[in-house]
């Protein structure tokens, strides 16, 4: 899995977060999870494969919010019982 963190400027409320989340889901239907935080000014996306950064920027910028940065890193899902694995 890949975790992509997008710094987004302009989100002011929960509805703004929803608009960004919906834009990402429309552009990338294959994503597993999308969550935005106006307090942190970021959107976190989990997907099986790396996302096309330009397509991601275009999708979010088209909603009226501004992408300030994009970073991706490998991600390992941490389940409730992950502490049992050694």
Image (cartoon, grey):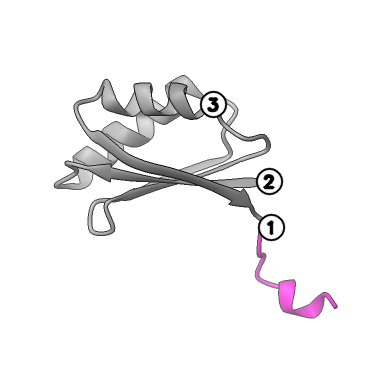
In the picture, the disc for residue 52 is 3
Image quadrant of residue 6? top left
Q: Earlier in the sequence, mark 1 or mark 2?
A: 2
Question: What residue sits right under mark 1 in the picture?
Answer: 76
The percent position of residue 10, horizontal first and vertical second, equals 17, 41
How far, Cα to Cα, is label 1 from label 3?
20 Å
In the picture, the disc for residue 85 is none
Q: Earlier in the sequence, mark 1 or mark 3?
A: 3
Q: Quick one: 71 or 11, which is closer to the camera?
A: 71
Q: Are marks 1 and 2 in contact (CB under 8 Å)?
A: yes
Q: Quick one: 6 or 82, which is closer to the camera?
A: 6
Q: Is residue 64 magenta?
A: no
The percent position of residue 15, horizontal first and vertical second, equals 20, 39
Report the residue at 68% width, 46% height from top.
Answer: 1
Q: Which residues are magenta?
A: 77-86
The percent position of residue 56, horizontal first and vertical second, equals 43, 28
- Going by the image, does 7 lie left or right of 81? left
- Label 2: how many Cα within 10 Å (few below 14, some 14–19, many 20+): some
Report the residue at 27% width, 20% height from top.
Answer: 62
Question: What residue sits right under mark 2 in the picture?
Answer: 1
Q: Earlier in the sequence, mark 2 or mark 3?
A: 2
Report the residue at 27% width, 52% height from top.
Answer: 41
- Going by the image, does 56 lie left or right of 80? left
Q: Is residue 85 above or below residue 45?
A: below
- Label 3: how many Cα within 10 Å (few below 14, some 14–19, many 20+): few
How far, Cα to Cα, is label 1 from label 2?
6 Å
């Amino acid at each position: 899995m890949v975790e992509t963190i997008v710094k987004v400027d302009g989100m002011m409320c929960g509805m703004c977060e929803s608009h960004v989340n919906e834009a990402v889901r429309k552009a990338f239907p294959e994503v597993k999870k999308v969550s935005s935080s106006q307090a942190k000014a970021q959107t976190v996306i989990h997907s099986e494969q790396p996302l096309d950064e330009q397509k991601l920027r275009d999708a979010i910028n088209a909603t009226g919010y501004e992408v300030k940065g994009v970073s991706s890193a490998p991600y390992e899902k941490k389940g409730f019982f992950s502490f049992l694995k050694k």
